[in-house]
Image (tube, helix red, strand yellow):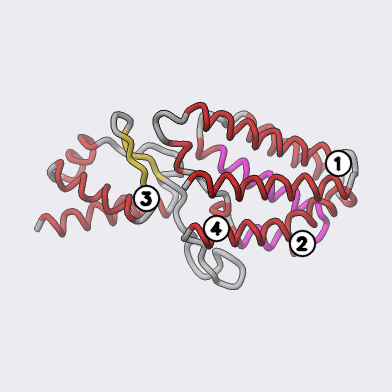
Amino acid sequence: MSRNLTADLAADLRLRIVDGDIQPGDKLPSENTLIGEFGVSRTVVRAALTRLQAEGLVETERGRGSFALTPPPKGPQAVPGGRPAASLKDRLHLLEFRIGVEAEAAALAARNRSERQLKAVLKALEDFTASGEHPAHAMKADYEFHRAIAAASGNPFYSDALAALGQRMIAMPRTRLMTGVEHYARDHFEQVVHEHRSIYAAIADGEESSSSAAMRNHLANSRRRLRAAQ
């Protein structure tokens, strides 16, 4: 019976995370809240959270609680060609793909962007810069920054590619949520802000080669950070 209760609770929380009701970086309800909501024992709650940890959906830190991680993409359109990006190897391959696509999109944005499109890139940059205390907001603003650059390229296929990837193309490293790594998380975020600013500045200046190089550098660094976070 307890196995069924554990499975039911894990399924409910899994659905909330995958559907976005609980965003990456958000704290899950406390053990006491889940006990009261589902009428189960503490043992069942902990077993369900352990199951979600094993699936890579949750990170639990003693004294802080449990936090949602970036779920794997849903459906065959999560990545162009229908390939999911659930494992570390898949996510690294996805970043390699993004380097090839987005470096060229940034160069085209420097050449083709309108003032309205440049303002959209700047707005996404400002939103991301202001989101450091909320990982879920940071993830959304990060995605919107890359989407705005793709739109500014003037080639709709770049926008279509990023729309197909969806917001989950932005990984949520576990280390951003862990106790004892706040300094790392702050340095990580500030470095990404600096990289985004460099991309924006090059596009604003109309420097095609510099825009491409700045985007390539940013995504290569993202790949390195993802490896280091595991």
Q: CA distance from mark 2 to mark 1?
A: 18 Å
Q: Residue at x 83, y 50 (%)?
A: 109
Find out whether the residues at labels 2 and 3 contact each other: C-beta distance under 8 Å.
no
Looking at marks 2 and 1 on the same chain, the residue that comes earlier in the sequence is marked by 1
- Indicate which label's residue lies in the foreground, 4 or 1: 4
Extent of the magenta region = 138-164
The disc at residue 149 is none
Asked whether 140 falls inside the magenta stretch, the response is yes
In the picture, the disc for residue 156 is: 2
Residues under numbered marks 4 and 2 in contact, where contact means CB atoms less than 8 Å apart? no
Mark toward the start of the polypeptide (3 vs 4): 3
Rounded to the nearest angstrom, the CA distance separating label 4 from label 2 is 24 Å
What residue is pinned by disc 1?
A: 115
Would you identify the image quadrant in which residue 62 lies? top left
Residue 228 appears left or right of 40: right
In the rendered structure, which amino acid carries the disc numbered 3?
Arg
Give the mark, 2 or 3, whose residue is nearer the N terminus.
3
**Residue 177, how many percent across, how many down?**
43, 36
- What is the residue that sits farthest to the left in this orientation? 1
